[in-house]
Image (tube, rainbow, N blue to C red):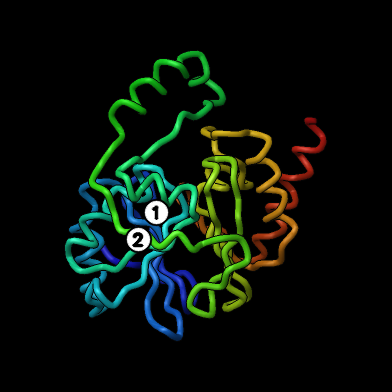
Amino acid sequence: MTFQPLTPRLSILRLGMVNCYLYESARGPILIDCGNPGDGPKILAALQQRNYHPGAVRIVATHLHIDHIGALAALQTAGAPAAHMSPLDGAAVAQGSWIRPMHFAGPFAWFEDDINRRMVASQRGAPASIQPDATDGVVLYDELTVIATPGHSMGHISLYSPADGGVLICGDAAVHFTAQPNISFLYEDKMAAIESFKRLAGMSFAHAVFGHGKPLLGIADAAFRQRVARFTRNA
């Protein structure tokens, strides 16, 4: 299992149903998201293949959910530094919380209450070290601009780099399983999720990558705008 190049600076590590990314900044490597509990050895092995010690790798987490920060504490035990997160989601992760109650679209909606009870009761893990400084407009390591994209989680962030024609790292602000990207079918606030998606669609970027689904390489911003047009028609 290795980080596979997507652009000159960005590589993907596919961890089953979730992806994490390695961004090669001028100031060193940045890991974006950390997979599920148990993914720590896979991430460490992939970093080792690049000759990166975990202590030399910065970490940014897009949001608090278990499949994006599940291995964070294990990576920090191996020497990784505190992870940059939004203040809201970062405060939860620092206390070992991996979830807040969510709404479910489609076939999951009818048993939403039962799922939330189970998730809130069980989704806790080891507290992790967090830098809660990833607020809207902050530029991390001179290259990755933080974009506040609440909705899927209310402290969710996305990241943008102007390098390589423009790279958008969506986390779960968008997913890509069909011809066009879309909002996730899980969210704390659906209208906020749609507004965040529209904000991303208003930007210019050649490439977009997602926590779930295939990367969009090329004129990715056009695919976002096409989806927004469908939101408008269906309103």
Residue 217 in sight from this viewpoint: no
Mark 2, Cα crowd under 10 Å, few <14 / some 14-19 / many 20+, is: many
Quarter-wise, where is residue 137 in the image?
A: bottom right
Circle nearer the N terminus (2, 1): 2
- Tag 2: residue type? Leu
| Badge 2 element | strand
Q: Position of residue 200 (x, y in %)?
A: 67, 55
For mark 2, what is the residue? 13
- Residue at point 81%, 38% (across, down): 232
71 shown above or below 167: above
For disc 1, the marked residue is 19
Image-based side of 28 in relation to 103, left or right: left
Front-most of residues 92 and 197: 92
Confirm or deny contact between disc 2 and disc 1 (CB under 8 A): yes
Q: Quadrant of the C terminus?
A: top right
Give x and y (percent) for residue 29: 37, 76
Q: Position of residue 105 (x, y in %)?
A: 56, 26
Q: Is residue 105 left or right of residue 84?
A: right
Instruction: Give SS at disc 1.
Output: strand
Which quadrant: the N terminus?
bottom left
Q: Amino acid at mark 1?
A: Asn
Whether 161 is drawn above or below 146: the answer is below
Residue 164 horizontal side relative to residue 83, left or right: right
Q: Position of residue 99 (x, y in %)?
A: 40, 36
